[in-house]
């Protein structure tokens, strides 16, 4: 899609989630779909819960700070994951925080 | 001066079904 490092994203309002062991279960009300995020997906989800309008670059930096991962791999896999969340209408691109 | 970094895994979204 069109996710750049300075693209701010946020969780949509019509969803709820719950941590179940190492996974996070998410229910999207509008479509009635429910999903499972693995441990790393749940970590990113928790960042978005705590920080409305966090940019892709900020999420990437947080991952690089906390996990042993190559920067290029991190960027590619993060954008792919966020693309998936966007496609399923679990997150949305928001206006930049002033 | 820092704590060890955790092991990284590819973040994944899996569709479970439709309520």
Image (cartoon, coloured by chain):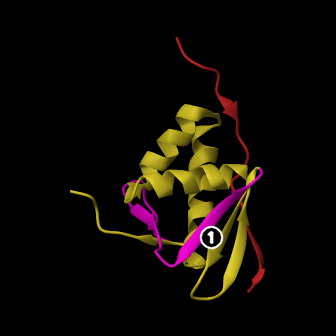
Q: Which chain is yellow?
A: A
Q: Is residue B13 visible?
A: no
Residue A58's spot in the image, x, y percent? 43, 47
The secondary structure type at the circle numbered 1 is helix
Residue A69 in which image quadrant: top right
| Chain at numbered mark 1 | A
Where is residue A9 shown, x and y percent of the image?
A: 43, 64
First to last magenta residue range: A1-21
Q: Residue furthest left?
A: A98
Chain identifier, red in the render: B
Q: Is residue A22 visible?
A: yes
Residue drawn at the location 46% of the way across and 64% of the way down: A3
- Residue A60: % across, % down: 51, 46
Residue at (64% x, 21% y) in the render:
B4
Q: Is residue A53 above or below residue A86?
A: above
A16 lies left or right of A34: left
Q: Is residue A27 left or right of residue A57?
A: right
């Amino acid at each position: 899609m069109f996710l750049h490092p300075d693209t701010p994203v946020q969780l949509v309002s019509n969803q709820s989630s719950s941590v179940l062991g190492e996974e996070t279960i998410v229910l999207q009300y509008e479509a009635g779909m429910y999903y499972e995020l693995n441990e790393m997906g749940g970590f990113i989800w928790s960042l978005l819960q705590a920080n409305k309008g966090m940019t892709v670059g900020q999420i990437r930096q947080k991952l690089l700070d906390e996990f042993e991962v190559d920067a290029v791999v991190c960027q590619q896999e993060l954008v792919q994951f966020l693309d998936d969340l966007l496609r399923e209408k679990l997150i949305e691109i928001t206006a930049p925080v002033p | 001066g820092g704590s060890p970094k955790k092991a990284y895994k590819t973040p994944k979204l899996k569709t479970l079904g439709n309520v």
